[in-house]
Image (cartoon, rainbow, N blue to C red):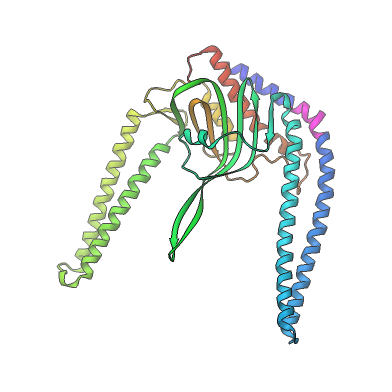
């Protein structure tokens, strides 16, 4: 099976090389001409706006230095013009860059991916927040902003790929006024592969040490809270001068001893819960740990984790999480980049093969995982996915 997959990978690569020379490069040459023309127009526009801003600044200085009779009115007008020119410059620059990138991605995706694979760029993802929450590998979120999405069908498996940002809305009060703030809990790529099977449990896959770090963080937080209250209690006792019964050194020793006891208790608790999880809850495979909702061993295809690593490498990510539930295989890849699926930019040459190849390999890594799942199920139908 591995030989078949390696052969498929080589075929995909040779198909891409052929497609690049025959279709992609000629297509990108057209957009390269467009890019150069638009870049020149943007340069002229930005130069004009910058020149207008500089002239406005000079006039403001001139008006301020020489005491004209209508000085206030002129000065106010110049400030308004300065703000207007600056804001318009930012808007023009942002729109020119994003519009070109979106147009390029929309036009070139089908050509680069070779639409026989059935994957296309979509305006809106059909992946619901309900599916994301059911996976149990994401923090709670209130808002979602999608940068880009791709959907289609590969080897009779429905595929959804989404570059998104998830945020929590937090409410707080400042000076008696109710305010809200937005906190980003996830930014990256979500891949959802529809399985032909329905699983009645949840299998969660995370980088090795994830569960351990959660336990350590919880125990550390509890320890800090106890130490804080303990120190505050002693400080309150010291401030009550009528109850002073020890000298400064003795109070310091008391604080240090108490904190050390709490730290020691936290270490023991962390070790206990880590050991309990290791014995009862988790399997460890390769660089990953597996947790199942029913505590039974997960039946995962051989090579599954190797191909998860390929996806992680293709997206240049440090971590990767996966949840298998119902008929979904959902993969979470934290990535801080804003343009994960960027084919090209207004600022550099479009026909460089390495940029297009990096885009293509992201999808190739996902295709190979789907092929592994299909080949494994053909061989062993009793697998969980």
Q: Is residue 257 above or below residue 334?
A: below
Q: Position of residue 259 (x, y in %)?
A: 26, 54
Residue at the extreme front of the image, as rendered: 177
Q: What residue is drawn where x is 70% and y is 67%?
A: 83
Q: What residue is drawn where x is 76% and y is 48%?
A: 346
Q: Position of residue 350 (x, y in %)?
A: 77, 41
Q: Position of residue 48 (x, y in %)?
A: 81, 63
Q: Is residue 246 left or right of residue 219?
A: left
Q: Is residue 153 left or right of residue 248?
A: right
Query: Where does the N terminus fall, quadrant-wise?
Result: top right
Q: Which residues are magenta?
A: 16-25
Q: Nearer the viewer, residue 322 or 178?
A: 178
Q: Is residue 57 visible?
A: yes
Q: Nearer the viewer, residue 302 or 179?
A: 179
Residue 90 in which image quadrant: bottom right
Q: Is residue 47 left or right of residue 360?
A: right
Q: Is residue 315 visible?
A: no
Q: What residue is drawn where x is 80% and y is 62%?
A: 47
Residue 120 in which image quadrant: top right
In the image, residue 19 lies in the stretch drawn in magenta: yes
In the image, residue 255 lies in the stretch drawn in magenta: no
Q: How many marks?
A: 0
**Dominant secondary structure, magenta:** helix
Residue 57 in which image quadrant: bottom right
Q: Position of residue 34 (x, y in %)?
A: 83, 45
């Amino acid at each position: 099976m591995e030989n078949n997959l390696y052969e498929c990978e080589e075929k995909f690569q040779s198909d891409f090389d052929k497609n690049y020379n025959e279709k992609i490069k000629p297509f990108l040459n057209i957009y390269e001409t467009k890019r150069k023309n638009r870049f020149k127009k943007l340069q002229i526009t930005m130069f004009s706006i910058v020149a207008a801003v500089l002239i406005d600044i000079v006039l403001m200085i001139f008006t301020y230095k020489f005491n004209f009779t209508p000085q206030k009115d002129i000065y106010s007008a110049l400030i308004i013009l300065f703000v207007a020119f600056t804001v318009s410059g930012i808007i023009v620059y942002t729109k020119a860059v994003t519009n070109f990138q979106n147009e390029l991605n929309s036009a070139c995706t089908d050509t680069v991916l070779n639409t026989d694979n059935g994957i296309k760029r979509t305006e809106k993802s059909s992946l619901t927040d309900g599916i994301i929450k059911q996976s149990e590998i994401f923090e709670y979120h209130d808002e979602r902003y999608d940068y880009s999405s791709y959907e289609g069908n590969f080897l009779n498996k429905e595929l959804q790929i989404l570059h998104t940002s998830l945020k929590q809305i937090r409410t707080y009060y400042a000076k008696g006024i109710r305010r809200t703030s937005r906190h980003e809990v996830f930014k990256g790529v979500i891949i959802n592969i529809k399985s032909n099977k329905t699983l009645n449990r949840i299998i969660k896959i995370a980088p090795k040490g994830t569960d351990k770090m959660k336990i350590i963080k919880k125990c550390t937080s509890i320890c800090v809270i106890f130490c804080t209250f303990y120190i505050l209690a002693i400080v309150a006792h010291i401030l009550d001068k009528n109850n002073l019964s020890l000298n400064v050194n003795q109070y310091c020793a008391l604080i240090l001893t108490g904190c050390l006891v709490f730290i020691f208790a936290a270490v023991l608790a962390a070790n206990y819960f880590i050991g309990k999880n290791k014995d009862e809850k988790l399997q460890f495979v390769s660089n990953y740990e597996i947790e199942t909702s029913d505590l039974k061993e997960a039946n995962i295809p051989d090579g599954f984790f190797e191909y998860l690593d390929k996806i992680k490498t293709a997206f240049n990510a440090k971590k990767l999480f996966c949840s298998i539930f119902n008929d979904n295989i959902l993969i979470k890849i934290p990535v801080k980049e804003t343009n994960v699926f960027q084919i090209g930019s207004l600022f550099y040459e479009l026909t460089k093969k390495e940029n297009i190849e990096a885009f293509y390999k992201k999808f190739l890594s996902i295709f190979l995982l789907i092929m592994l799942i299909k080949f494994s199920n053909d061989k062993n139908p009793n697998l969980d996915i």
